[in-house]
Image (cartoon, rainbow, N blue to C red):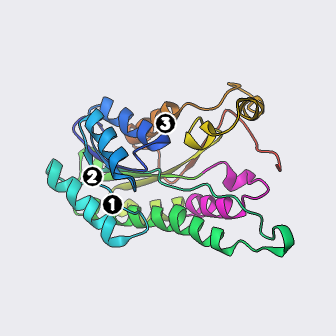
Amino acid sequence: MKITDQIALVTGGASGLGAATARRLAHEGAKVAILDLDPERAETVAAEIGGVATPANVTDEADVSAAFDKAAAHFGAAPRIVVNCAGVGLAARIVGREGKLSFDVFEKTLKVNLFGTYNVMSHGARRMTEMAPLEGGERGVVINTASVAYEDGQLGQAAYAASKGAIASMCLPAARELAQHGVRVVAIAPGLFHTPMMEGLPDEVTEKIASDVPFPKRLGAPDEFGLLAEHIVRNPYLNGSVVRLDGAVRLPPR
């Protein structure tokens, strides 16, 4: 799909991988809606790239539907490109100290990461199926964010790995279901990236984490995630796949 003049909606677009993806798509000529829980940061990024902020909670159906409607009203058509980057990275042991359980963490992580992704994908896909096909029969593309943790989940990441594993697992059946409408579904599984979650760590900890990456021996740059998202949009034969973007890293148990 050509990116120029296409409408895109990026969740979690006010920071990290989402902001980098929004900037990349806008640079390539897309009209981008920033869906984020933080309205001020969403407005900042939207103003920077000439887009529109559509603040919303990805777990709320009405919020998400309203965000898509706002994007369509602003740009004159519904998004053909949807990128799901919103998520949380909560960590907790299944059974912690003194027998403390972590069901609350598990529930919140699945609700935001998995249910939120499914919610946005559903609303995006419904609108795409109602649009006229482009050249080659394509109507749109959904890019979801998994994580290398879906295969290499570390100690304390049971909830996070489960949420990202579910995103990876639903990629193929979603792609098969939406294929009849010319809508593609692809997932990116990023490894260790320089995002706000990493920026809060001490330098020595970051250096140790980066040293585990075979090559390039560094954390991933958010724009490299955006670059892959751009390629997925452009390449019509990428469909139903989970693509690891990780510098060949495999996470150790802890």
Q: Say which residue label 3 marks.
A: 228
Residue drawn at x 34%, y 36% is 25
The magenta segment = 147-170
| Type of amino acid at the residue the image marks with label 1 | Gly
* Helix, strand or loop for disc 1: helix
Coordinates of residue 38 in the picture (x, y in percent): 39, 52
Counting residues from the N terminus, which is met first, the one under dot 2 or under dot 3?
A: 2
Q: Say which residue label 2 marks.
A: 79
Q: Exactly how many numbered labels are in the figure? A: 3
| Type of amino acid at the residue the image marks with label 2 | Pro
Q: Say which residue label 1 marks.
A: 124
Coordinates of residue 73 in the picture (x, y in percent): 15, 55
Q: Residues within 10 Å of mark 1 (few under 14, many from 20)?
A: many
206 in relation to 175, above or below: above
Coordinates of residue 119 in the picture (x, y in percent): 41, 67
Prevailing secondary structure of the magenta residues: helix
* Helix, strand or loop for disc 2: loop
Q: Quadrant of residue 153?
A: bottom right
Q: Disc 2 and disc 1: Cα gap in Å?
A: 7 Å
Counting residues from the N terminus, which is met first, the one under dot 1 or under dot 3?
A: 1
Residue drawn at x 32%, y 29% is 27
Counting residues from the N terminus, which is met first, the one under dot 2 or under dot 1?
A: 2
Left or right for 128, reference 153 = left
